[in-house]
Amino acid sequence: MSRNRNVRKVASYDDYDDYDDYDEEDYDEEDYAPEKGLDKRTQECLDTVHAYTGTDLKTTQQEIVDKIYAFDYDINAVVDWLFQKEDEMRAHAASRASQAKSHAQSAPKKTQPIAVKGPAATTKAPAATKAPAATTKTPAAATKAPVATVASLSASSTGSSGSSLSLSSSTGTGSKPKRIVSQMSKQDREALMRQITAFNGKKTFNLAIVGHVDAGKSTLMGHLLRLLHVVNDREMHRNEHDSKAMGKGSFLYAWVLDTSEDEKERGITIDISKTYFETNTKSVAVLDSPGHRDFIPQMITAATQADSAILVLDSSVGGFESGISENGQTLEHAMIIRSFGVESVIVAVNKLDLSNWSQERFDFIVSQISPALSNAGLAVHFVPCSGMTGENLLNRTDPLLSSWYSGPTLIDLIDSLATPPRQIEAPFRLCISNTFTSKNGLTVEGKIESGVVSLSNELSIYPSRELCSIRSIMVADDKRDWAVAGDNVVLILKGVEQLNVNIGNFLVDPEFPIPVVKVFEAKVLILSDRFAFHNGLVVQMQYQNVEIPATIKKILRTLNKKTGQAVTRFPSVVRDKALVVVRIATAHTICIDKLSRNKHISRFALRKGGWTIGSGVVTRLAKPPRSSSSSSSSSS
């Protein structure tokens, strides 16, 4: 089994590959026009702010008015924000002026021709020598409800496609020259697809384990792995000995997955743990995720890779109620996995042995949580069980449970889950979740979101555009000549240095590059009214294996959750849990695509102050700037 690194922040790379033109309505002057005819209260608040700050400001009146609404007419908060913004703008202007002056001093001075009186000279002045193009630097790695309407974010994918890009020549000023990419021929690809179609082995199924902290997720899965003989006697004996020595004897099964010293000491899951087991029909990749609120970014990473999930509930009196409370993670985890495309979930009602297998307690829990999950669009399967005793995981032996429950065991339910359709015919996309150097070379891990890959492929690492080839492919610890969408793979690469490969980078087919953008339009479902959702709101965008600061640049419209029709255009602030279309700008460029082309790499979550406040899908990619000078200056 493997451990994923903590979620990292994305590296920047100022380049673009694909975009959409916004409709004229999106750039209409109405979008940026100041509000007319302010109401009396807003005008008085604005006058009071100007009394503190004066009117000689770089900040526009519309921005100030938006903040008045956002801060609910709190004048002190608006003034503090305004002073801070003005200071930042002045510092930014001074910095740009200093850089321009430094650049002007370092630039070679042009020789001015000497004017000669008399007849016009017939000799032409020599052409100015062009400065060599700057070499683009490779980006340095950075570290790491109505729940009823989550389904309204989803839309049917119309397939995946990409525009062809020649890599045999330079892609622009400052780009590294690319060698000609050697890809498989059409005949070889057809032969590979026939081989994949004829494959009779068990297909990979990615299963996320989620739920409130202390619900018993790791204990449940650790005991199941023990019963399936994935864990040997020697390892279990060591866990039993070490857990008793630390006074934590009940953690012996949890430590099958929680293997780090920090996790053992604290008694909670911190990182995602990945391991495999097989059912009658599936090769299951288990993604055991943290339940503590501090580690929800790691849980979101697991959700982005999941085909389905087990939502583990603590059925003990007080435990279940804590999980579904305002500060609990049970419903938040359910909304997150639904937002990332999961459509079915197994609800494991754990620790029911503590209630003497009470049917009354089981029915109460089902009645309390079932409406919220069903309204979110999740197909739900409930199963009573005990992670500590192992009851109803693989077999059912306790007569107290058998007296009223005759349904499937946990392993039976896992085996019955339907595998979602894979985008095998789409261009290859893999987001790197881990990277390290082994004795065989540079190794990366990740889930193939779309397409196929084989040993004969060359790949491009985005956003740096480094080319590499594949030395080895591993799927579920087995060596393969190929892998397909849905597989969690380990690839050994050659032809690239580890410094140029970071968590959050994408491996893609060089003939079909992935868009690299900084501004995009998205459909966002607001999940929490804890914060006012307004223009200029700064959030953390959680996408694949990275988190990046982002800003809600403009709320374009609110939508009817049932019909999808526009309700309000250009609201400054939205206070309820609404469905909105927004324009988002990220702090750095990211590799992302729109839902109509690739449903797996178009989904994201928005977080602020430790809370998940929204989930969204990309619908349009912004048109990049055309000026080469601006592009080069921004990249420098």
Image (cartoon, rainbow, N blue to C red):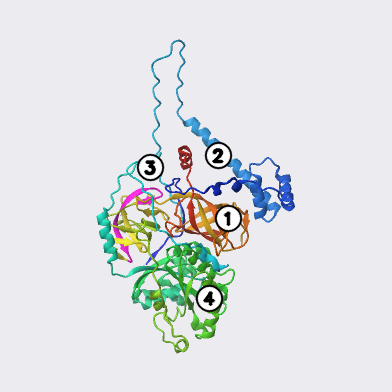
- The CA span between labels 3 and 4 is 53 Å
- The CA span between labels 2 and 3 is 30 Å
Checking the image for residue 557, the label placed there is 1
**Circle 4 is placed at which residue position?**
370
Q: Residues within 10 Å of mark 4 (few under 14, many from 20)?
A: some
Q: Is residue 187 above or below residue 370?
A: above
At 37% across and 48% down in the image, what residue appears? Answer: 465
Instruction: Give the image quarter of residue 568.
Output: bottom right
**Circle 3 is placed at which residue position?**
171
At 39% across and 22% down in the image, what residue appears? Answer: 126
- SS at circle 2: helix
Instruction: Give the image quarter of residue 483.
Output: bottom left
Answer with mark 3 or mark 4, whichever residue precedes in sequence.
3
For the residue pair 1 and 575, the one nearer the viewer reads as 575
In the rendered image, is residue 611 in sight? no
Residue 50 x/y as whole percent: 71, 45
Answer with mark 2 or mark 3, whichever residue precedes in sequence.
2
Which quadrant, please, contains the N terminus? Answer: bottom left
Residue 549 x/y as whole percent: 52, 53
Foreground label between 2 and 4: 4
Checking the image for residue 95, the label placed there is 2
Q: Which residues are magenta?
A: 460-476
Residue 437 x/y as whole percent: 34, 56
At label 1, which amino acid type do we have?
Arg
- The CA span between labels 2 and 4 is 56 Å
Cβ atoms at labels 1 and 3 below 8 Å apart: no
Checking the image for residue 272, the label placed there is none
At label 4, which amino acid type do we have?
Ser
- SS at circle 4: helix
Q: Is residue 466 magenta?
A: yes
